[in-house]
Image: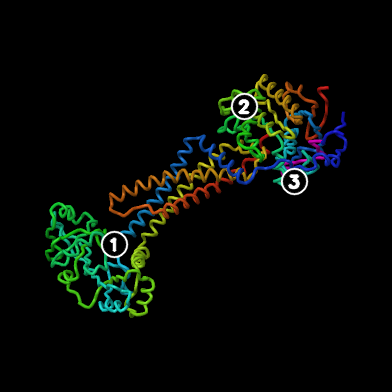
Amino acid sequence: MAQPCPVELHNVTFAYGEGELRRTVLRDVALRVEAGEIVLLTGPSGSGKTTLLTLIGALRAMQQGQARVLGQELAAAREAERVALRSRIGFIFQSHNLLGFLTARQNVAMALELQGGLNEAERLARAAEMLSAVGLADHIDKLPAKLSGGQRQRVAVARALVAQPGLILADEPTAALDRASGQEVVHLLRDLARRQGTPILLVTHDPRILDIADRIVAMEDGRITQHSSSAA
Amino acid sequence: MNQHLQKPALQAADQGLATPCAIRRPGALASLTLAIRLAWRQLKADRARLATAIAGVMFACVLVFMQLGFKGALFDSATNMLAAMRADLFLMHPMTQASFRPERLPRIRAWQALADPDVAQAVPIYLEQATLRNPATGSRRSAQVIGFDASAGAVAFTGLPPLIEALQRPDTLAFDDRSRPEFGPVGRLFRDHGPYHLQLGRRDFELVGLVEIGPSFGADGNVVMSETNFRRVFARPPGMADLVALRLTPGADATAVQARLRALLPADVVVLTHAELVRGERAYWEKGTPIGFIFLFGSIMGLVVGMVIVYQILFADIAGHLSEYATLKAMGYSNGYLSRVVLGAAVILAIIGFIPGLGLAVFLYDFVAKATFLPLHMPPDRALSVFLMIFAMCFTAGLLAMRKLRDANPADMF
């Protein structure tokens, strides 16, 4: 039997606004991400992919449909349940969003502070390990301002992965990077996720990184229009 | 290709990831410590902003300390004379509101009090104001004259015991060395040249020594003399005194004696302990003047200004880090955790602003006390109550600033 499915959406419909201003951005979306699978979500601006990502990441309350993420039913989830779920998901944003007053290692360790049972030394050791894994062993005690854009995004990758999340959600992680650093970051992300067996759902416009995907899902007008398996 | 679009087997999934909550959260204390550490790291990162915040808290602190200090000093100095006059119990006319305007009580009450076996001595005290001539310039200034039989030993002033013999001679007096400087270099001349003549009212007195009392609201300086000498200067009905000091036998219970005397004596006297006597005088100045209100108002203004400064700093810190805060929320940090970070920053500011504020206030107390002769000092309970005020001020600022956290919405991060 296959492992349980980390992301499972069924009939998800979502709209912004009220009354005449109501604008439906997701219509009857169904999506599964299998364990260990890397799924890229593409589509033009306004197609609803970011909204879909925020729903899966429990950053927004659901309106209609069913969604189960890492075993948590989202349709009727309370705020506290959503907050708890978020701590089991690794997020990577368009901009790195590192805390400027913390060093790279402290930023990564922040993702571990939500877990009990680890002391400060263990947190810092694991953060340093993860930073070495993204190739920043020599930069662990630098502030984000002293790092290049690609390095910062790699710190963000380390932060998303260090707590061994059940799922990685990434939104345009290469948008602010040049081609080389962008490639480097997504390949790192893919390799590390593969090693941990973590599934990734990644929203992107960037055609240069499509090669990392197990499967590409295209969206348009709030609907999923196409699934294609890229790598064999 | 559309194998993933099959009807999701939600039930089947239950078996594997059935319990969504697998992660153990840290304990409340650990979580609070981490929140406060994060707050401190954030404050520390912007030195200029931190310095502004500390300066703001210090400002509020010093302002409140000075207001309370001046208030306390004024009320303390208002009661200097009575505070310096030490005896076990006092008899006073119930209509007496303040020592500079005493109602007279029958002197016979002193002898009646002696009926109690525990009352060892009863000494009538006489109070009048008279002008004292400045020995250097010849100008006159009004001083409080305190007359009583010092040899009985019921009333003690600092510096009085060695002068008791000398004060029994005719036309002698002791001068309060802590009187305001307008009386001239009375004390310095005495220390340099020994006894000399001073004019009190229209009469020449021999200055035989110095005592320590301090100026009050009612008088700039004090003079102590014997009852006999007092009667030479002031024509007074012989049967009336202004105050009676009682000395009790050693080991007597002052409260019990006080209760017995209340029962024994008629209603034209009240029996007071030294603390009650001083408190009554202080209450007169506190209630009878707007001094208390003026200083309360000043203190509140200081706290309001301090709160606005701290609020601004905390608000700017949140507003400048909205996306970082939103990221933390996305990572699973709760609103409550981030609120604790903001309140933690507020509390840190309260503490690190209070400590230099206290130091500066102690320095200023000393400085101002030397310049104004006001008895400014820092009692521990005042330091504690100002700390609590500053703490409440910063905490309120934190609560107000916390509302800005709502703007950090992780859903807007993508």
In-front residue for pair A217/A112: A112
Q: Residues within 10 Å of mark 3 (few under 14, many from 20)?
A: some
Q: Amino acid at mark 3?
A: Ala
Q: Tell me the SS state at disc 1.
A: helix
Measured in 3D between alpha carbons, the distance from the residue under mark 3 to the one under mark 1, in whole angstroms, is 72 Å
Q: Amino acid at mark 1?
A: Ala
- The residue that appears at 38% across and 57% down in the rendered structure is B294
Cβ atoms under marks 3 and 1 closer than 8 Å: no
Answer few, some or many: residues within 10 Å of disc 1's Cα (few below 14, many 20 plus, some between 14 and 19).
Answer: some
Whether residue A115 is visible: yes
Does B64 lie within the magenta span?
Answer: no
Q: Residue at x 29, y 70 (%)?
A: B247
Q: Which residues are magenta?
A: A5-22
Q: Quadrant of residue A163?
A: top right
Q: Which residue is mark 3?
A: A77
Q: Are marks 3 and 1 on the same chain?
A: no
Give the colour scheme shown.
Answer: rainbow
Query: Which residue in the rendered view is the most extreme toward the top?
Result: A180
In this view, B271 is above or below B396:
below
* Chain of the residue where label 3 is placed in the rendered structure: A
Q: Earlier in the sequence, mark 2 or mark 3?
A: 3
Residue B213 x %, y %: 26, 60
Query: What quarter of the picture does the C terminus of chain B occupy?
Result: top right
CA gap between label 2 and label 3 equals 33 Å
Q: Which residue is mark 2?
A: A152
Write down the residue under mark 1. B84
- Snapshot quadrant of residue A208: top right
The quadrant of the image that shows the N terminus of chain B is top right
